[in-house]
Image (cartoon, rainbow, N blue to C red):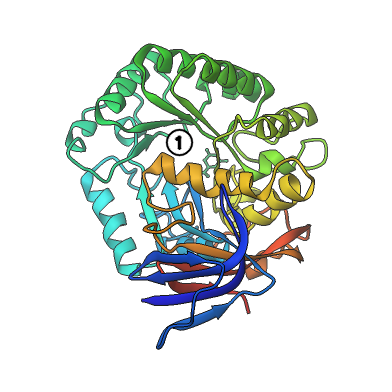
Amino acid sequence: MELLIKNARVVDVSQDFIGDIYIKDGVINEISKEIIVKENVEIFDCKGKTLMPAFIDTHAHFRDPGLTWKEDLETGSRAALRGGYTGVCLMANTNPICSSTEVLDYVRNKSKELNLIDIHQCPSVTKNFDGKTLSHLEELKDDNEVKAISDDGVGVSNSNIMMDAMKIAKENNWVLMSHAESSEFSKVDMRIAENMMTLRDIELARITGAHLHMCHVSTIEALECIINAKRKGVNVTLEVTPHHIALTNDINNYRVNPPIREKEDVEAILSAIKMGMIDTIGTDHAPHTLEEKAKGSPGMVGIETAFSICYSTLVKDNIISLNDLSKLMSYNPAKLLGMNKGKISIGVEGDLVLVDIDKKIKIDSEKFASKGRNTPFEGMEYYGEILATIKGGRILYKAL
Ligand code: DOR
């Protein structure tokens, strides 16, 4: 597969120039201000548009197996491509829950057959989210494809079990992704629920030395706790979502866990992003039917809208540069998940996204490739349209 991309503004974590990129056999083969056109090579002229490493989502739910009326691996992958993503880390709250090689094999085989994006499926921390059994992790020790484990959706309540899980994660070089929500407080106060669990998990990470990834961090207190721990050398990374960056609960209180927070929390997230203390943006793409939403299911789809929301809120509003956004959406997620992408350099997979940063778009869920239409951003206008998504030199998504 050969593709020659011409005349793009090329932006990644550390560069910004106008030039050409040549992809051969799936990887970036040449980068230059001008590459001479080769014979029999597909040319993609991108004059006036911005080319970045494709995005990698550190946090998504594709609901396959078992909940495929909400989403499946194909619609999730197509939604990812439409949002500029070629890599995702999927959470384990499927049916059955991903606690076995059978479920892992199912997801991996189906994603190989689809041949659309790179899917990292997280196995659960506790077996079937029972909150206590870790024996299934033994079975996964020799599985080199496992990079991260998570009980996202519920979290691990028992502190002793969480400590043992962190020890196992450390031994195996896995990232432990934490959904910080203390079930003791969920029904009382979702702020206390997040803060208490964050304090606990940070302390356990300090004790065990495990790599802890704090998912969808949303409160000022949790942020402060994690940033302090980072400064003290605790092995912790920090993820935020587009919705916790762009919405405040006085204006839009769409149901999601963790909830949309106060203005002060959002300001704290924005200033942490500016200070370079946030590691990744994860969408927490969580499709539900509108009937399920009406009955109270928490979550929203987000993978098709993440870039424009983040670009408008963070770059257009002068909080960070486009290089920094590329770091949050591509470079750091690739590092976290051990993927050979997320930057534009020779030998790296040819996964790229072409965007029009000047184009204003109106979010229209009818156009989503996802089965989910559950978005609080319906009708809102943002800058930054995804024009094309390229995976290993193949143009797999192109806007009409
Ligand atoms: O709002 C949420 N929805 N938060 C989660 O952690 C899980 C997700 C889902 O799976 O629907």
- As rendered, which of 250 and 172 lies closer to the eye? 172
Q: Left or right? Give the position of 321 relative to 185.
A: right
Q: Looking at the image, which residue is at 55% across and 72% down? A: 34
Outermost residue to the right: 251
Q: Is residue 78 visible?
A: no
Measuring from the top left, give residue 210's x and y in whole percent: 36, 22
State the residue at coordinates (52%, 72%): 397
Position above or below: 329 against 196: below
Q: Amino acid at mark 1?
A: Asp
Q: In which quadrant of the rendered view does residue 304 lie? A: bottom right
Which residue lies under the disc numbered 1? 152
Relative horizontal placement of residue 113, taking residue 21 as reference (left or right): left
**Residue 183 at what x, y percent from top left?**
51, 22
Q: Is mark 1 within 8 Å of ligand 1?
A: yes
Position of residue 32 in the picture relative to residue 104 (left or right): right
Q: Nearer the viewer, residue 228 or 180?
A: 228
Which residue is at 69% across, 56% downward? 308
Which residue is painted at 65% across and 22% down in the image?
A: 191
Asked if 12 appears above or below 273 in the picture, the reply is below
- Residue 347 visible: yes
Image quadrant of residue 270? top right
> Which quarter of the rendering shows the N terminus?
bottom left
Query: How many discs appear?
Result: 1
Q: Position of residue 72 (x, y in %)?
A: 43, 61
Residue 264 vertical position relative to residue 63 in the rendered view, above or below = above
Work out which quarter of the rendered image holds the C terminus and state it: bottom right
Left or right, 192 with respect to 106, comes to right
Expressed as whole percent of the image width and height from the top left, the position of residue 136 reads 22, 33
Of residues 227 and 376, the one drawn nearer to the viewer in this rendering: 227
Looking at the rendered structure, the secondary structure element under dot 1 is loop
Q: Residues within 10 Å of mark 1 (few under 14, many from 20)?
A: many
